Amino acid sequence: MLSKKNLVISAGFVACLAGPAYAGTIIGSSATPASATIKPGAHVEVHYKFDIKYFNNETFGCGAKVTYSTGGAEYIQIKAPTASITRTQAYPAAGKYMVTVQGYAHDGLKPCLGSQTAVSTIQQFGVVSGVGMAPHMAQLPQGQNTPGGTVVVQQVPGTAMALPTIKSIKQVQYTDQGGETWIEASGTGNCSFTISGPVTASFSTTADKPFPIKVKIPNAPTGSHLWTAKGTGSCTGQATATFKVEP
C-alpha cells in the first residue's frame, strides 16, 4: 500500500510526464506614443510593447506571429524569462498604424496563447480631427470677425485630439478569486465598452475615471478563456486576450 507521501510524489511524476498545460500568454499591449502629430518631411517613431505571462511550465517555448499594418510579418519564439516583446516603427505620414502579436504554430512550436494589437494614430500637424476642411484649416466659431471664417491651427506636436478608443486589456493577476477576475483596460477618451467572454459586462470611462481602468468581471468561470473588449457607441477599437481564472 502506498503511503500519502508516496502518492504525492507519484502524482508529481505523472504531471511532469504529461508536459506543460500552458505556454506563454500574450496578455497586454501598448503603443508609445498612442497619438501624435507629424509635420511635412518629418517622421514619428512609435514603440510597441506586448506583455507576456507564464501560468505553468516556464521553460516551454511557444510560437507567435508579429504582423505590421504597413505590411509584412515575422515569426518568433517566446520563452521564459521573456516578460515582453518590443518593436519600434518609424512612420513618415499621418495614419492609423497597428502591430499585432498572436499565438502561431511554426517551426515545430506550439502556438502561444492570446492575441494583442497595439494602435498608434498619427495626425497631420495643424489638422483638427472631425472638422472636415482642407489641411491646416479649421472653422472658427460663429461671431468671429475673420475673413472667410477660417484660421490656421497652430497645434503643438503630440497634442492631437484623443478619440475615444479601446486599445488593450490585461488581467490583474493578484486580485483573482474563485468566481471573478479583474481586468485592466487601456485606451483614450471617454469610452463606453463591453468585455465579453464566458460572461459579458459593460463599463465606461469619464474625466474622473479615465484609462487605464481596472474593472471586475463577476461570475467568471475558472480556467482559461478568450476575452474581448469592444468599444460601443462613439467609442471604437477592440482588443482580445486569453486569461486564466483560478478556482
Image (spheres, grey):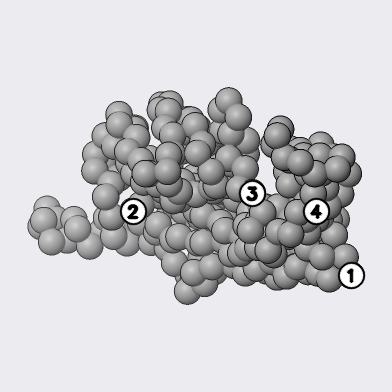
What residue sits right under mark 4 in the picture? Answer: 152
Specify which label sits upstream in the sequence, 3 or 1.
1
Q: Amino acid at mark 1?
A: Gly
- Residue in the foreground of this view, choosing between 175 and 93: 93
SS for dot 2:
helix
How many numbered marks appear? 4
Q: Amino acid at mark 4?
A: Val
SS for dot 4:
strand
SS for dot 1:
loop
The residue located at (71%, 32%) in the rendering is: 142
The residue located at (44%, 61%) in the rendering is: 54
* Cα–Cα span, label 3 and label 2: 33 Å
* Cα–Cα span, label 4 and label 2: 48 Å
What residue sits right under mark 3 in the picture? Answer: 161
Specify which label sits upstream in the sequence, 4 or 2.
4
Q: Amino acid at mark 3?
A: Met
What residue sits right under mark 2 in the picture? Answer: 173
Mark 1 and mark 4 residues within 8 Å of each other at the beta carbon: no
Mark 3 and mark 2 residues within 8 Å of each other at the beta carbon: no
Q: Residue furthest bottom?
A: 81
Circle 1 residues within 10 Å: few <14, some 14–19, many ≥20: few
